[in-house]
Amino acid sequence: MSGVHTSLERRLISGLALVGAIGALCLLLFIGIEYGLTFSVLFDPAELPVVTHELTEHVLIPILVLILPMTLAGRWVVRSSLRPLEHQAREIDEASENERGFRVDATSLPREVVPFADAVNALLERIDLASREQEAFAADVAHELRTPLSVLALEIERLDHPASERLKEDVARMRRLIEQLMILAQLDIDTPQVADERVLLRDVAEDVASLMAPVAIRQRRKIAVESEGGDYVVGRREAIAAAVRNLVDNALRVTPEGGTVTIVIGPGRRISVRDEGPGLAPEKLDQLRHRYKRADHASNSGAGLGLAIVSRIAAAHGASFTTIPAEKSLRLQFA
Amino acid sequence: MRVLVVEDNERLARLTCEGLRNAGFAADPAGDLEAADEALAAANFDALILDLGLPDGDGLKWLRDRRQSRSIPPALVLTARGALEDRVAGLDAGADDYLVKPFELAEVAARLRALLRRPGARGDVELVIGPIRFDTNRREAVAHGERLELARREADLLELLMRKAGSVVRRQTIEDALYSFDASVTPNAVEATVSRLRRKLEQADCGDMLHTVRGVGYLLEERT
């Protein structure tokens, strides 16, 4: 509440000051009438001390006595009536990771602000609806692309042409993108209310390792699972598995031939994926995880939307997603 | 091995059949569930590839009904749906395996071969994975034409790995399959059996086909 905007607090305070000034004026007037004072007495040297005395006793002293507590009380009243607004603003600010489904809580707001909050909520509702429709549309498009892509892949398989291997790789990349789009769309449609399944991290790690091992072996890399404990976490099993799958996918890409990608579970509610690549700097992770937000489509790194998806799943589960470059690990720490 | 491909997209059905024929299967297309019923009544099929979104009904419901009323060949469900919930529903309905579109033909062929290697499937007597052949009746294994001298548990383990070739067999699955429940299993019994089998495979020059997924299980690589 600063800068060019009119401060509500300042307006209320100056309003109160004006009220005080009017009050003092009325008091002066009242005393003047009560004691039959006229302007002429101000010029009468005999009457002046009496008048000054009266004014000091009945106007100046009461005002001086009252001015400090009244100012403080005024400030307090103004501040405390504005506090719910500040509180709500902070809440809205903090809701930035999981925007979908957020509403301003009008119950704690002063009655006068409720219509404003309602209007904001109605706007949020419309934005939610629009983005849901957009995502459902993206999911539909991805879904509709599957059959033509299957046909394309099969047609390429029939080709006996030096370019066919390259084309196959292109189709594989498109397939991955479509899968990731579907996961993203599904997450957004099904969350933010993350299902409260109890998910054993060990099961997730073994499932993902089993699923990815044949792929890894074809690429001459190994997958392993190491356990340092590993508790239950609460969330959507399929979403957590998708996150770990994306981490393994990413790790396989940076690990050289013959290397091992290790899924480490524990200690506690933690699951990490360790690779044999150069390690990922925190700034780089930040860049990758926000790719979908920045609409950065220029990347040729092949990382796709993988880490952005992991980040989204982590946020929906209240988990932190960090990189530990020294250990060459990416880590999900659940609350 | 004869496969029925139930898929309503004509071009996709034709290409899938063609690809499967190149991979050594006999394949026939069926455009809808009615055609599938007719084909199944007319001929013997070893396996079924089933698309879920068909014009004349829900493929999963059809599969469930047929499974209850009479025996139909093992089914590989092929679908554009990918969520785990669908997968579970599919496997509950009697699908034997599940593959999400868009698929690679090599993957379809591998999954089909895995289905046909299941116990009870036709052509069950001899298992063949690359250079390794296993006679399930005589419990004898041959690799690169050389006979492998396997103890009973090693033969059981090799059969298990061959039937699931191309996918990871969990340590617990191996333990359950090799040792009866009352037998006291020493903690590293599975590892010991695996390493004995690995040595014998190495002697026959097939050692590199057996992979360890540390902390999870083992995988016998599928080679064609």
Image (cartoon, helix red, strand yellow):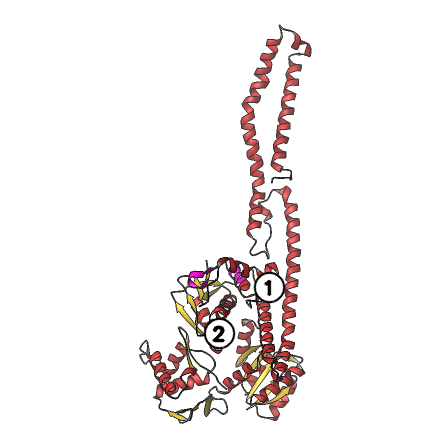
Q: Is residue A325 magenta?
A: yes
Q: Nearer the viewer, residue A61 or B148?
A: B148
Q: Is residue B106 left or right of residue A134?
A: left
Q: Vertical placement of A228 versus B14: above or below?
A: above
The disc placed on residue A212 is: 2
Residue A231 image point, x, y percent:
41, 64
Instruction: Please identify the quarter of the rendering in which residue A124 is found.
Output: bottom right
Total of numbered circles in the picture? 2
Q: Vertical placement of B203 versus A287: above or below?
A: below
Q: Vertical placement of B58 versus B133: above or below?
A: above
Tell me the chain of label 2.
A
The disc placed on residue A189 is: 1
Kind of residue at badge 2: Met
Range of magenta residues: A311-330
Label 1, secondary structure: give it: helix
Kind of residue at badge 1: Ile
Label 2, secondary structure: give it: helix
Residue at x-position 59% and y-position 73%: A175
Residue B131 image point, x, y percent:
45, 89
